[in-house]
Image (tube, grey):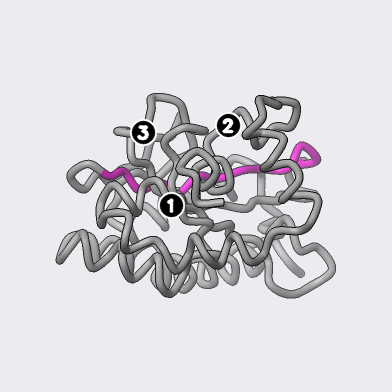
Amino acid sequence: MEEFLSVQDATNKVFTELEEFTGWKLLKSQRRLKKKIGSLELYIDFFTSKWNTSYRYVGLNAEFSMAYKKLGKLPFQHIVAYCAYHPLTGDDLYWYDISTTDKLEAVIDELKQRIQNTALTLEKQIENDLENAVQSVLDDHFEEYRVRLEFAADILGTDAIKPQVQTVIESLTDVQRQQALDYKNGARTIPWMNNPNNLKYIVDNNWI
């Protein structure tokens, strides 16, 4: 018979195991693992389901992100890349089920593998060579990590981001192209027009 866990025991196990695995600092009150490398900060944030009930159900997921605070103090300004850790298979593709000991151990093993292939790989690349790391992310993970072009241009120069700029422009729908024209003419009625993002950055630089 499976042993069901309390919410606190299950989530704390995830936090402490992944703290040890990554070697990053655990900010327990923020449910965050953090690693600072020069001007960059790497985060793994944990989120829990509002339906969590001890000894019945515990759901959790996580997100890896990279902050470049030169672009601003607030997260929506300085988060320059991120990817989510959600279940890849099963009935629920949003929350990992860590309700029992067996499920918890399986999820921790999967998160370790995914973190190794993303956050820890990028950490090592940045420590070895920042510019090569950013170029690699730009070339190989632009869409997967939702990389901010403004950040990449600040590190590598604008010439380095031109292929991705062109990719974004070619992917625009007719509606988005009209929105870009409206934005140039002063419209600020759609969220992307008011917050940092790649389309706004491209239009602001007159690349479209």
Residue 73 sits in which quadrant?
A: top left
Coordinates of residue 206 in the picture (x, y in percent): 49, 44
The residue at which mark 1 appears reads as: 149
Which residue corresponds to the image point at 51% horizontal and 47% vertical from the top-left?
202
Q: Going by the picture, which residue comes out furthest to the right?
A: 91
Mark 2 — residue?
195
Q: Is residue 41 magenta?
A: yes
- In percent of width and height, residue 165 lies at 49, 60
- In the image, taking residue 30 as reference, residue 107 lies left or right, namely right
Seen from the viewer's position, the closer of residues 188 and 124 is 188
Q: Residue at x 66, y 25 (%)?
A: 186
The residue identified by callout 3 is 71
Q: Which residues are magenta?
A: 40-52
Was residue 139 drawn as part of the magenta stretch in this picture?
A: no
Up-down: is 53 above or below 143? above
Q: Amino acid at mark 3?
A: Leu
**In this rendering, position of residue 43 left or right of residue 132:** right
Type of the residue with mark 1:
Leu
Q: Earlier in the sequence, mark 3 or mark 2?
A: 3
